Image (cartoon, rainbow, N blue to C red):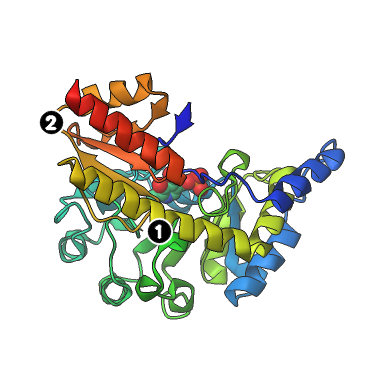
Amino acid sequence: MIQLASNENPLGMPAAARQAAADALAGAALYPDATGRALKEALAARLGVTPDWLVLGSGSSEILTLTAQAVVKPGEGVLWSQYGFVVYAQAAALARGEGRAVPAQRFGHDLKAMAAAITPQTRLVFVANPNNPTGTFLEGARLQEFLAQVPRETTVLLDEAYTEYLAPRQRYDAIGWLRAFPNLVVARTFSKAYGLAGLRVGYGVAQPALAARLNAIRPRFNVTTPALAAAVAALADNDFVQRTYELNRVGRAQLSEGLGQLGVETLPSAGNFVMACFADARGVHAALLRAGIAVSTLDNYALPDWLRITVGTQEQNAAVLEAVADAARA
Ligand SMILES: Cc1ncc(COP(=O)(O)O)c(C=O)c1O
């Protein structure tokens, strides 16, 4: 089966990370390093912060849930955008917060409406950039403006799971912004561009006071020994991330243009996936499955006419286009 349903890396994992994880298994009779020292030091050096700005998670999903648990009390407000990542609602529910999705604007975040929706009870706002599943992108300057409007008592979690896929002209320095915003958490992951989705490693970056609140409730051994070792190796492999970026840039255009030629509407995407609209999305989903290709339906986002297709290798993308064309002829 060609797996294009969960936005993983079609290149697999970096060879050095695979080796590091395998080597680390030898020590896996012992508990992992609860401080994640080696990974935190490598990340701190890369990001220009000190290790006390970092929180490690079992995937960045755990950073999302930990943040909600740290800052939201039962009944307090949590906001996200319509078509926001499903884990935001789960994180709000886990903290027994009052979750609310703010209506989207052309499938993306309506930051004006989100700022206006913040009340004195709002403790947490999730913003994903780029957003999954829509692939929509917010300019850095607009995000900064938004952050300046958010009261300090409200935490903003900026979810940058797909940040490595941004084109150079789209990039911005959210880590740099942290110095001005003590209420900001930036979440990133090793699951996408670093190819380690099955190992579950992500991280949050925040000023030390807020990072300490998250670390205080973090399960002590939440990142396993092989995952820690693989993440250190993956972080060092700039070439792998560059190849991933390039494969995605070309493959995303291949998919979007190819679907366009078949008369299928797609949204411009800044991530490693494309959202495409079909008259019979369910039928196309089933036809792709019969052709050995798994993509994602979006019923759980109330987008029943759309499918989300992860950008694969050139051959995988070609297989998707062929299967869609076949489905249209059937
Ligand atoms: C927007 C967004 N944030 C966070 C994640 C979490 O990924 P992980 O928990 O694997 O780091 C995903 C995964 O699909 C995502 O799409």
Residue plotted at (15% across, 50% down): 103
- Please tell me which residue is depicted at 18% across the width and 25% down the height of the picture: 329
Q: Secondary structure at mark 1?
A: helix
- Give the residue number, with chain letter if any, for mark 1: 249
Above/below status of 24 relative to 123 = above
Q: Quadrant of residue 253?
A: bottom left
> Dot 2: what SS?
loop
Q: Is residue 99 visible?
A: no
Q: Residue at x 81, y 39 (%)?
A: 25
Q: Which mark is residue 302?
A: none
Q: What amino acid type should be assigned to the residue bearing mark 1? A: Arg
Residue nearer the viewer, 268 or 251: 251
The x, y position of residue 37, in whole percent, is 74, 60
Q: In this orientation, which residue lies closer to the viewer: 10 or 159?
A: 10
Q: Where residue 284 sits in the image (x, y, percent)?
A: 25, 26
Q: Examine the image and state in which quarter residue 168 appears.
A: bottom left
On the image, the x and y values in percent for residue 82 come to 21, 47
Q: Quadrant of residue 301?
A: top left
| Mark 2, residue position | 279
Q: Is residue 160 above or below residue 312?
A: below
Mark 2 surroundings within 10 Å by alpha-carbon count, few (fewer than 14), some (14 through 19), many (20 or more): few
Say what amino acid the circle numbered 2 marks: Ala
Query: Can residue 21 be seen in this snapshot?
Result: yes
Residue 321 x %, y %: 31, 37
Sooner in the amino-acid sequence: mark 1 or mark 2: 1
> Up-down: is 183 above or below 200?
below
The quarter of the picture where the C terminus appears is top left
The structure residue drawn at horizontal position 25% and vertical position 26%, both measured from the top left corner, is: 326
Few, some or many residues within 10 Å of mark 1 (<14, 14–19, 20+): some
> For the residues marked 1 and 2, what is the alpha-carbon distance in whole angstroms?
27 Å
